[in-house]
Image (tube, rainbow, N blue to C red):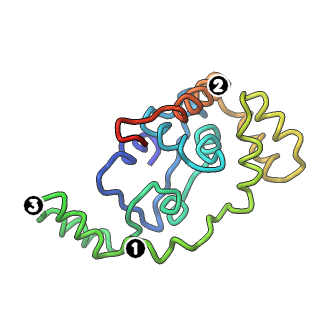
Amino acid sequence: FGGGMGLALNSSTRIITENSVFAMPETKIGYFPDAGAIYYLSRLPHNLGMFFGLTGSRVRGVDAYLLGFGDHLVASSEMNQIKLEIMNCNSAEDVEDIVRSYGDGNDNRDIPLSFTEDIPEINTAFSASSISEILSNLQNSNTKFAKDTLSLLLKMSPTALFITHKFMNMAKKYVSERGV
């Protein structure tokens, strides 16, 4: 998704296939993720949202589903048929029933994220209260992951990093009308 992730995350029926890719590359071009995306990213555990929002790293297929970016995980080979059936629907409930009939992905809920081994380091580095502290945390680590992430962050717009970090921390405190 990217650019439309904030819209897509607020959709009533969210379908992910093994080919889906989610990313928020805004900090690379001097922007920051939109409010809809920041709201959802700020709710990911282990500071993963801060990591994805700042680095623009991609989340693919099953990982996107496991992180809650979609409600249904279906095979991409089924998408044309799903689209045909949806075009003949009379209600949102019909759409949901059709998509659910192709799978809800629950068989994949026990699969670990593909980057599980990096989560402790992400959580530590990106829990920092400032961008300079995040950079320092990464500099002080000797792992390949930390070095690669530091190199990536140094290519991003410093202003965009600062704004994204600030907005992400503000969004963590926001409670929606639904209590989320």
Residue 89, compared with residue 58, is above or below; it is below
Residue type beneath disc 1:
Ala
Residue at image coords 71%, 55%:
119
- Identify the disc placed on residue 173: none
Which image quadrant is residue 55 in?
top right
Asked which secondary structure carries label 1, the reply is: loop
Q: Residues within 10 Å of mark 1 (few under 14, many from 20)?
A: some
Residue type beneath disc 3:
Asn
Q: Which residue is mark 3?
A: 90
Residue 18: image x %, image y %?
47, 68
Query: Label 2, label 1: how many angstroms apart (C-alpha)?
Result: 38 Å
Q: Which residue is mark 2?
A: 162
Mark earlier in primary sequence (3, 1)? 1
* Labels 2 and 3 touching (C-beta < 8 A): no
Q: Which residue is mark 1?
A: 75
Residue 157: image x %, image y %?
65, 27
